[in-house]
Amino acid sequence: MHILEAQQLTKIYGHHLSLKKALTNVSLSVEQGEFLGIMGPSGAGKSTLLNLLSTIDTPTSGRVMMDGRDITHLKGHALAEFRRRQLGFIFQDFNLLDALKVRENIVLPLAVNRLPVDQLQGALTHVASVLGLSELLDYYPSELSVGQRQRVASARTLIVKPQLLFADEPTGSLDSQSATEFLQYLQTINGQEKMTIIMVTHDAFTASFCKRILFIKDGQIFSEIIRQGDRQEFFDRIIDMQATIGGGGKTNALRSGD
Amino acid sequence: MLYDLAIKNIKQNYLLHSIHIVITALAVLVYFDFSLMAADHKLIRLYQDVLPADQMLTFFSIVVAVLLIVFSIYWNRLLLKQRYQDIGLLQLMGGKISKIVLSISLEILISELIAFGIGILLGLLFYKLLAMILLKISVFKLNIGFFYATKPLLLTLALIPILQIIIFLNNLITIKRHSLIKLLKKKDSNRYSPVPQNRAYLLGVLVIGLMVAAVVMTQHVFRLTYELSWLLHLPESFSFLLVFLIIVGIWTVGMYGLFRIVWPLIFKLIGQNKRFYFKDTHMFTLAELRSWFIQNYRSLAVMSLLMGVAFSMIGIGTLLSRYGMASVDGYTPYSVLTTSKKRAAVVDQLAKERVSYYELAPMHGTVIPISYHLQTVLGDDYVSVANPGLVLTTTTYNYFAKHHHVKTLKLKNHDAALILPVTSIIHDRQYQETGKRPRVKIGEYADLNFNIVKLSNHFPLGQALSFDMAVVVNPSDYAKLSEGIRETYYGFILPKNLSSKAADQIAALDQVQYYHMTDSYLMKYGKGTSKKNPSIFFHNQVYLRQDQQRDMRTAIGLMMFTGVFVSLVFVIAIGELLMLKRLTVAQELEKDYQTLLKIGVGPKRLKRDIIYTQGFIYLLPLVLGFCQSLMVAGVLGIFVNRPSLHLLYLITGVFTLIYAMLYLLTTAFYIRTIHI
Ligand SMILES: Nc1ncnc2c1ncn2[C@@H]1O[C@H](COP(=O)(O)OP(=O)(O)O)[C@@H](O)[C@H]1O
Ligand SMILES: [Mg+2]
């Protein structure tokens, strides 16, 4: 069974006079344990799609099913409860709470789930060692580098062991080395913990860590590629696809290099 | 260009500006109407026998103006802080500082003009209503019409340039002082870091100690005054001022420490309970509160102190009115009192009015033309200054005591009872002790002449006979005391109040009596001699309780009216300042709340957190302010017989309601700002 299924998602922003159709009839399904990438030029509707899939926003029409359950119109407490137990989010700008230490930022979701303190400690130790944060627990976010901050944000997400992890341009603020490290962590988690990951990116290098990639253009699915060989090969195919779509900066750079 | 920018900024920050407009308009309304009232002769004349109403109104209008200036400076600083980045960018693009400051000034001017317009308009509109309220609580049964004068209007308008100049200079200096880099920096997060924990414990204890010390000192303020004046050979008024300033200083430092150190420490300590801390959003809430106190400790301390001033005004008013009413209320054991010279006329008049009355036995007393400075030694405790009204001989005292069921002192023959006014400073408890240890020292009063006038404006017996306390003096002191002028008084008890016409007629019998003192008398009792006529003092000869009661009510009415309005402005200003600060916090934290939502914290839960946090933040200055008013009331209460604080509680209740409304509004705006 699909862990996530979207049917005919359409999203229209704005009111009567200035309507903006950001997404048109998008359907897709995601299998348990997948590492799915969503790519496309800027403004294509990637974030919109991710927000709809992850309950952060509601579609104008269509629906999202998770484990066969319609989650499109969850509200209030039920929605909060659902997000807390099933979903994890990682954002481009980390969204760490500045007033709290790294340790506290990471365990916050568990505290909200009202887990007993001793279990909290165990989970923290585990996730911190996986993400290499053990030494940093007593710092404040403002004292860390951006790469470290993104890892903290990931730790906060992963500590609840969500079924589904959503990431919107998670490497957007990272330098290439931090980005590589971070993506390797994601790969590890995807492989070891069997966590399903859906990641939005416009960057081919980042996308090459995925197992499958959906390309979006003008609010519609344009095409799909699946990784078969090694990462380099996958990366080249992604670049080709970007060239076909005619969006990404690298494609243009390649062309002008010809 | 400048104008367009200003208008654009106002539209963008309409909430900030509406807060400014509300408080400014309110202050202007009060300032303008108080000034109008002070100029309204018809109104002021009603009070002329009782109080210099115009001076009082003018004084309080100035207090409001000062508050407005302080508020405006503060508000402007917040506005400026929000603009740092814009200002930095403008400067980067080559904008001139003075021009930038001018555009901000223009923005503020527009907002100010709106506020002054509203304030003055409402002032004119509500003048009659306010004046009627004033007359009503001063128990005048008459109507007063609309009043307008140009001078008060000009005085009000003059505030605009004053505010503008102050704000302009303030901004110019602030921006010049900040480097471009500092301006361009996003926000100065963690402006103050928490005090290291081991030091915080020590300092926290110190702060609490200081505050306790201040409370204890207020309870012994008179004793301290005397100790100090004795120790340093200072005049007592000066020494009192010194003690007062010391207490205020300690309390202020304590207040700063409370917000800077103690509260953050408390939140830290609460956080050490891991079970509590790592549950729900507790850690976020605690961290937020902690940084709120650390970052805003100065303004929170000032707000709490100002709240204290506001409530203390009400507390003082409450007790003063008790003080006044105690001398004229039902406990006063006579309705009419006359000197022997006027007795016949009063009896005639009473007969003419066909009222039944009961005459008390003649009371032989001594009029003391000065305020003695009594230092009653009670153990090691000093009781402070008293204004004795009358000394009775033992016989008279005993007669009186028996007749009116007052607590009886067993006096030996030739002892004397010095009857203190009912509202005098000696407390019941102290009276009991005095009874046991009757030692009274009579000191000298430095400012003799002043006190002759002061005392003689009252009927010397006025409050003296309505005592339920007394101080016993020894015979030699009594001998000194009795060098005053002997006078016999006649008291009448009327079962019912007189009609106001009859009352007026009795009151009309009153004439001031002039006493000519010998030089030697004056030489003995004081150093001060007036250039005018040092040997004359006077007092009234007919006292009508009903009449005095009315005057007292009139005075209290005016006092409470001004006090309540001024403190209301204080309370609202504080509530609105908190609103400003909280909304700034909301803007800063919007992202954090969104993050919490994404993590899966329910919006209901977040709202509940906010309501509680906000409630706590609003409650603190209120509670602290109220405690301060109780402290002040505690000191004043010593002067007041049967002090009752009901009025204080009542008005505090009303203020709390208004303040609570600001709290609810703030919370609603806050929740709207963070979009949950
Ligand atoms: N809240 C919104 N209101 C109106 N339009 C929006 C909103 N969010 C996104 N859009 C528009 O929808 C389109 C898709 O946006 P988005 O999903 O953020 O693109 P991407 O993440 O692929 O860059 C864009 O044209 C954007 O301007
Ligand atoms: Mg996007």
Image (cartoon, helix red, strand yellow):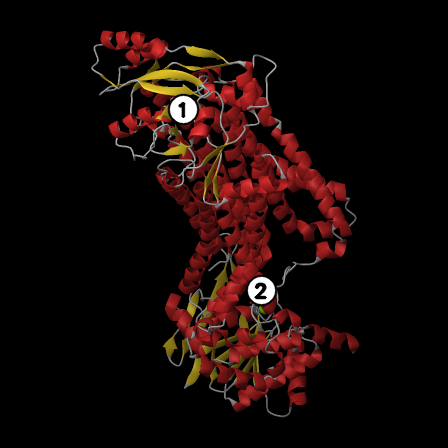
Amino acid residing under circle 2: Leu
Image x and y of residue B598, in percent: 49, 69
Q: Who is closer to the viewer here, B589 or B139?
A: B139
User: Is there any visible trace of residue B1 in the rendered image?
Assistant: no
Of circles 1 and 2, which is in front?
1
B441 relative to A179 in the view: left or right = left
Disc 1 and disc 2: Cα gap in Å? Answer: 54 Å
> Pointer 2: what residue?
B202
Image height of A232 relative to B588, above or below: below
Tell me the quarter of the image containing the N terminus of chain B. Answer: top right
**Is B669 placed above or below A193 here?**
above
Instruction: Report if residue A258 is visible in the image.
Output: yes
Task: Determine if the C-beta at disc 1 is less than 8 A from ligand 1.
Answer: no
Q: Amino acid at mark 1?
A: Leu
State whether label 2 is within 8 Å of ligand 2: no
On the image, numbered disc 1 is attached to which residue? B390
Quadrant housing residue B159: top right
Q: Chain of mark 2?
A: B
> Where is residue A201 drawn, in percent x and y?
61, 75
Mark 1 vs 2, N-terminal side: 2
Mark carried by residue B117: none
